[in-house]
Image (tube, rainbow, N blue to C red):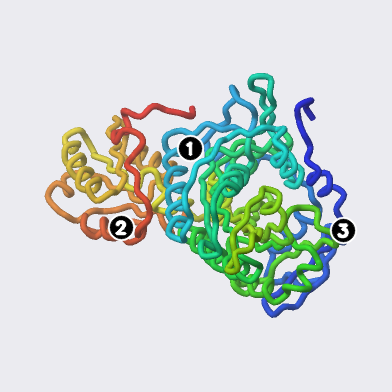
């Protein structure tokens, strides 16, 4: 631990906190569970193997990674992301294709939150360490802080949008008519001084992009209704990205026992909305500023879990920050605050997409990102320079339809160029020759649903291919290529 590292009281409390573990079913049955040897007992996990892995990981509380997860090799191979050795560990560099994916995800998540009613704001990245209110909140949040100095004063780098949004809300004039009031920021970046042994590619970072939406609610009844709306929003966001709900995630709920006993039916309703049993961590005391939070957790190839979506019932910070509203009778009251990240860190979303495809590779299926996120959606391979203009003309037609197209104009054999396109997970590969000069019919090598060593070739017209891609991408955000169209003009970012 460095001299400047500050350990919050919440982190210390987390280390000594006694947790009680349960599985809660959709029917409302609560099963106490425990670890015996390397097994988790107390519930029949026959049809819930990932839930068992999630429970084992959470109950063991060991976060360090013993070996490199597959997404790290994939993020380099696809020239998306890499480590930046000129920075602090856990601060990564993004190549053009990685930046494209990240930007699309940022736009999509923000679009969904704004449609829900989030008012987008922007707040500073650093705050006065000795600010009387902020310093108290630091100690109620289980995160390690980055500390920086400026003009002989200490500042900490934010780990969420709470600080700026709460200081903003403190100065606002709020009526009960405005509630629930929703503030949103995509924090690029948030910082947590994670332990070096816990840093792990895109999974666990020190600098990350966090969509953070707070809702200020009149009372618990309004807050519960709002949390249900946000729970559905989170499912919609994660499904829209390309995950299957609930298959790809496990629901975790962390809750104070007294609150669980009082709001049992509400907790069960969340489990029902999720669609399968949940892991419950219960405490007899309240160590943090919230009485309950839920998380969508992803179990990776190493059987370790990571939290994505989260929302919380915050019962402390309105009063701590002096955030109040005027009720129907003109009285000053403090709202309940909800803290939602509808996707979790954007970097972690990319991690999960890559890990999911790594699992698919093990099953001999061709890995592929969701089509709307593929940096290059079509690659055209002219058999010789004679057909280069035909390929360029076709590429122009696809580009006008908001489809990202690359042209492999290198002096390599067709098999080598097809192989390279497959290694880059390009969804549609088309060889351009004499037949394509004289016909509208294309022989398209289609990646989706194909085996690793098999080639799925589908005959379709240009119009049919455009229609298929547009239908699959739907109303998702679009960005053009972040690299030149011709492969020969693209530098190699990762050798």
Secondary structure of the residue carrying tag 2 is helix
Give the spatial CA distance, label 3 vs label 2: 51 Å
Residue labelled with disc 3: 37
Task: State the residue at coordinates (77%, 34%).
Answer: 6
What residue is drawn where x is 42% and y is 38%?
97
The quadrant in which residue 202 appears is top right
Q: Which residue is mark 1?
A: 80
Q: Which residue is mark 2?
A: 470
| Labels 3 and 1 touching (C-beta < 8 A) | no
* Nearer to me, 333 or 251: 333
Placement of 296 over or under 189, stated as above or below:
below
Crowding near the residue tagged with mark 1, few <14, some 14–19, many ≥20 C-alpha atoms within 10 Å: many
Observer-nearest residue: 141 or 46? 141
> Secondary structure under badge 1?
loop
Residue at x 50% of width, y 55% of height: 365
* Residue 177, image x, y percentages: 51, 65
The relative height of residue 62 versus residue 188 in the rendered view (above or below) is below
- Distance between the alpha carbons at the discs numbered 2 and 1: 24 Å
Whether residue 245 is visible, yes or no, is no
Q: Position of residue 400 (x, y in %)?
A: 22, 47
Q: Is residue 370 left or right of residue 159?
A: left
Q: Nearer the viewer, residue 363 or 121?
A: 121
Numbered tag placed on residue 222 in the rendering: none
Q: Measuring from the top left, give residue 56's x and y in whole percent.
A: 77, 58
Q: Are dots 2 and 1 in contact, CB under 8 Å?
A: no
């Amino acid at each position: 631990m460095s001299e400047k590292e500050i350990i919050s009281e919440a982190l210390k409390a987390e280390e000594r906190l006694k947790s009680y573990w349960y599985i809660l079913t959709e029917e409302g049955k609560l099963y106490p569970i425990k670890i015996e040897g390397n097994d988790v007992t107390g519930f029949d996990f026959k049809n819930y193997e990932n839930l068992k892995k999630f429970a084992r990981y959470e109950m063991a509380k060991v976060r360090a990674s013993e070996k490199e997860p597959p997404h790290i090799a994939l993020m380099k191979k696809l020239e998306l992301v890499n480590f930046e050795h000129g920075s602090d560990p856990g601060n990564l560099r993004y190549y053009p294709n990685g930046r494209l994916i990240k930007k699309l995800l940022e736009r999509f998540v923000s679009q969904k939150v704004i449609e829900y009613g989030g008012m987008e704001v922007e707040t500073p990245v650093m705050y006065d360490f000795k600010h009387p209110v902020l310093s108290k909140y630091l100690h109620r949040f289980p995160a390690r802080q980055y500390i920086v100095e400026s003009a002989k004063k200490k500042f900490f780098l934010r780990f969420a949008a709470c600080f700026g949004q709460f200081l903003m809300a403190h100065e606002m004039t709020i009526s009960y008519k405005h509630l629930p009031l929703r503030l949103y920021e995509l924090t690029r970046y948030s910082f947590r001084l994670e332990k070096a042994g816990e840093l792990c590619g895109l999974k666990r970072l020190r600098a990350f992009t966090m969509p953070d939406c707070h809702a200020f609610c009149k009372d618990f009844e309004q807050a519960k209704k709002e949390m249900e709306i946000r729970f559905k929003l989170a499912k919609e966001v994660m499904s829209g990205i390309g995950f299957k709900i609930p298959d790809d995630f496990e629901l975790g709920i962390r809750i104070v026992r007294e609150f669980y006993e009082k709001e049992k039916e509400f907790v069960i309703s969340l489990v029902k909305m999720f669609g399968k049993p949940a892991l419950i961590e219960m405490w007899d005391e309240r160590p943090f500023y919230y009485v309950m939070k839920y998380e969508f957790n992803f179990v990776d190839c190493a059987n370790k879990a990571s939290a994505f979506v989260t929302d919380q019932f915050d019962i402390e910070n309105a009063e701590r920050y002096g955030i109040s509203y005027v009720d129907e009778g003109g009285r000053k009251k403090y709202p309940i605050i909800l803290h939602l990240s509808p996707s979790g860190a954007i970097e972690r979303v990319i991690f999960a997409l890559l890990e999911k495809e790594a699992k698919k590779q093990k099953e001999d299926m061709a890995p592929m990102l969701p089509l709307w996120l593929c940096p290059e959606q079509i690659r055209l391979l002219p058999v010789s320079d004679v057909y280069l203009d035909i390929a360029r003309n076709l590429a122009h037609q696809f580009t006008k339809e908001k489809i990202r197209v690359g042209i492999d104009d290198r002096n390599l054999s067709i098999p080598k160029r097809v192989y390279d396109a497959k290694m880059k997970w390009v969804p549609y590969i088309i060889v351009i020759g004499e037949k394509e000069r004289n016909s509208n019919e294309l022989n398209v090598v289609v990646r989706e649903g194909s085996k690793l060593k098999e080639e799925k070739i589908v005959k379709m017209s240009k119009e049919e291919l455009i229609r298929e891609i547009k239908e699959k991408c739907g109303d998702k955000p679009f960005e053009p290529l972040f690299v030149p169209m011709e492969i020969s003009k693209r530098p190699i970012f990762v050798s």
